[in-house]
Amino acid sequence: MPTPGIRAVRRSRWGIVSALVFLAVLFLYVIVLPIFRPRGALLWGHYRLLDVYAGIPVILATLVALTVWATPASRRRTVALRLTTVMLVVVPTLFLFDLVYTLAQPAFRQPDFWLDGGVIERAYSTPDPDLGFVRKSGVSWRRHVSERGQPVSYRTDEHGFRNHPGAKAADVVFIGDSFTEAAWIAEEATFVRRVGAETGLRVVNLGRGAYGPQQELIVLERFGLAYQPELVVWQLFEGNDLMDAKNFAVWRANPRARERPVKVRYHQNSAFFRLLAKTEDRAPSRELEILIDYHDGVRQRKELRYRVVPDQADALADAFAETEKALAAGARWCESRGARLVVLLVPTMLQVLESFITFERAEDRDRALPGGLVRSPGDFASRLRAVCEKAGCIYVDAFDALRARALIDNSRVFDRHDPDEHLDVDGHEVVARLIGNVIRSRKGDDRRHADQGRRGL
């Protein structure tokens, strides 16, 4: 009959074996099984968030068990005690650190309408009571864009715009959205700097991504007219400016950000979850997928972001009314300061490259190009032209010039690597030439008027 000591040893061994079997089953279920039967999007499409959180202690416990098993019997107890202590300290500490870090984030504690949407980076921007948000002054970064073969530098002046600091006066002021700011290409390649280089005039860039017409009007009043310009170029984008106008009106009516669930805020601000998000397997949405044939021989598959919406001025009537009101006010302010307003319309990539685009499904083409037309009577461009005629501004539509350039070489008209479909360096060159023509035309008019005045004397 076994003695009490032997029974205790057996019970101890049985307990150890049971624990090891339980750990092995847990390891197989949490770690191994999802490799063959995926059940989540994380870690490249295999694991759920719960699996990852549970997997960390399971992996550590398994490593401890294997280490103890490989240790000589005389030292197993000591090694097991030490490693278990370390694991019980490290795992809770990591989770506690992530929790404290998450709770300390401004976006978790003070949600913001503009800065928590995932488009505007808090690192470079800050809230503003009038504009919603502004870029921070003195921002500077340098990014290597592999497809261009060279780094792109970005910096902001004392007002948070992409200029050399210290400028007090300018002959031409540019306002607009991300197409004017152009943070994705070298500063000297933007149409703002090209106009300055080609005409010898002083220029200043007051473009800011994600701004709409009402915000651009505030920029003109707060910053632009202080430079005492002779010409103000106000760039609008056909793809989303009316939606931007609508969003700003919504924010202005209720500046408080909509409260989000704690779980959502935790995921958006947790350092650990941000790291995991990089491993998420996002299946392509196949939402309006297109093929673009470029002159350099490349055929690119791309998800189309901006469709042609012929009736958007009517569908977003309130936003169009806000845009019209902003442009009329801008024209009056410019005239009161002795400046002339030029309204520059940038079309979408689809409108310019339509002849080089193939849709994989016929229904996608119908959705993206209703009626098969890239421009039609009563669309945003024609309505905008009428607004400019009424307000007395110069209207410049870049559509024809960009499309003509694309027929010669479409490789660098729009940035093929940018999901937001911004202009590339050739597109900026075309726009700069259009604005240069306006400037030269005005100078020619001034000379003719001066000659007529002298002859009259």
Image (cartoon, grey):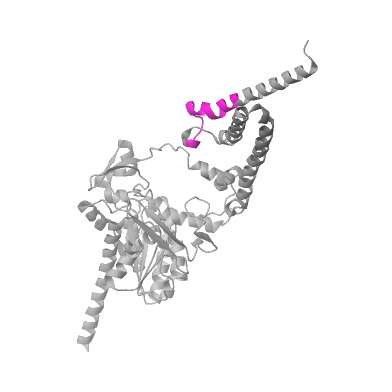
Which residue is found at the position 36% from the left and 50% from the top? 418
Magenta residue span: 24-43
Residue 275 seen by the camera: yes
Residue under the point 50% across and 36% down: 42
Task: Name the residue located 61 percent from the left edge and 50 percent from the top edge.
Answer: 101
Within the magenta stretch, is there residue 167?
no
Where 260 falls versus 166 (above or below)?
above
Q: Residue furthest right?
A: 4
Q: Considering depth in this image, is 276 or 418 the residue closer to the camera?
A: 276
Q: Residue furthest bottom?
A: 457
Image x and y of residue 374, in percent? 29, 49
Q: Nearer the viewer, residue 105 or 398?
A: 105
Looking at the image, residue 296 lies above or below residue 218: above
Instruction: Indicate the quadrant containing the N terminus: top left, top right, bottom left or bottom right.
Output: top right
Corner quadrant of residue 225 = bottom left
Q: Main secondary structure of the magenta part?
A: helix
Q: Is residue 247 above or below residue 282?
A: below
Q: Position of residue 262 (x, y in %)?
A: 61, 45
